[in-house]
Image (cartoon, grey):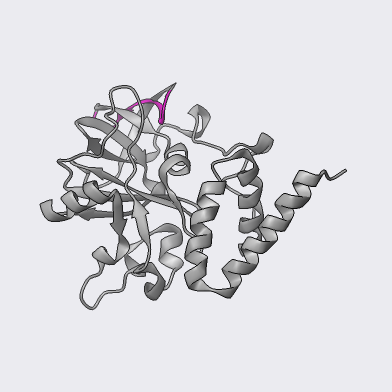
Amino acid sequence: MVDDLSIENEKLVNSLLEALRQSDEKGLLVRKLLGELLVSQDGISLLNVLKEEKNPGQPNQLSGGGGKVKSPSGDQWKTGQAVRRMSVNGRVIVVPEANISLIKEIDEKSREKYVKNSRVPLNDFRRFMHGLAGQFNGELSTIKDSKLKKIVLPVMVPHGFGLPDLPDKRADAAVLVHEGHWNGVILCTEVGGTAGEMSEFTPSGNGDEVGTGLLDNGEQVLLINVVSLLKREGFLVMV
């Protein structure tokens, strides 16, 4: 039996989908609204519908049972997994290599702008005679340059024990991370030139921290839950 709330939710979903189909410019506003809706429990069903609309018949990688978003947990991290090392406000963290869209060096002027505005325009990453889409991994790589250059992603700050609440003001790199259509930017220093492998993993839970791990060089690092970070502070890109 469908209650009145479910009917209203279905009407809202249909209206938003129709708005997305009709106008790219209006679609940007609608996508912002979707991002706000998705932080609520009812919003998870909206994401399911949107992903099914875009990829009918394909499994939903973000949604889980009970109206909650799946997050990387202890049983999803394993030894030998490819991770990327970086430092945020002096704390060494790693994120799964599979969740990285782009790593870009930034100068002092760009860093100050990103920290002040808490936003990173993708148009800043344009290069002469090179397209934007070809630089990215993940969903961003499938979007036309004409639309990519209009997208602005939020600066995200991982939460956890000993991690400051503000962006790294000494950052010399911007790491763009993604999970499905969710995207955001971590400002950091000391980004590893190549992906490393995790030799040990100890699960724990503190904010966005999934646990601690040892890299193949013996360095101990914090493992960051990219999904929880993106759900809280990221932007839903649907074009």
Q: Is residue 154 above or below residue 206?
A: below
Name the residue at 37% across, 73% down: 145
Name the residue at 22% across, 71% down: 127
Name the residue at 37% across, 46% down: 97
Q: Position of residue 216 (x, y in %)?
A: 28, 32
Give the quadrant of residue 94.
Answer: top left
- Report the predominant secondary structure element of the magenta stretch: strand
Which one is in front, 226 or 19?
19
- 39 vs 136, left or right, is right
Q: Is residue 15 above or below residue 23?
A: above
Which one is in front, 123 or 40?
40
Query: Of all residues shown, which one is farthest toward the right?
Result: 1
Q: Is residue 117 magenta?
A: no
Q: Is residue 225 visible?
A: yes
Q: Position of residue 35 (x, y in %)?
A: 51, 50
Q: Position of residue 38 (x, y in %)?
A: 56, 46
Query: Of all residues shown, which one is farthest toward the left?
Result: 108
- 142 vs 216, left or right, is right
Q: Which of the image's four quarters has the N terminus?
A: top right
Q: Is residue 209 magenta?
A: yes
Which one is in front, 119 or 84?
119
Q: Looking at the image, how many numbered discs can be counted on the residues?
A: 0
Q: Is residue 66 above or below residue 112?
A: above
Q: Position of residue 178 (x, y in %)?
A: 42, 50
**What are the residue bounds of the magenta stretch?**
206-217
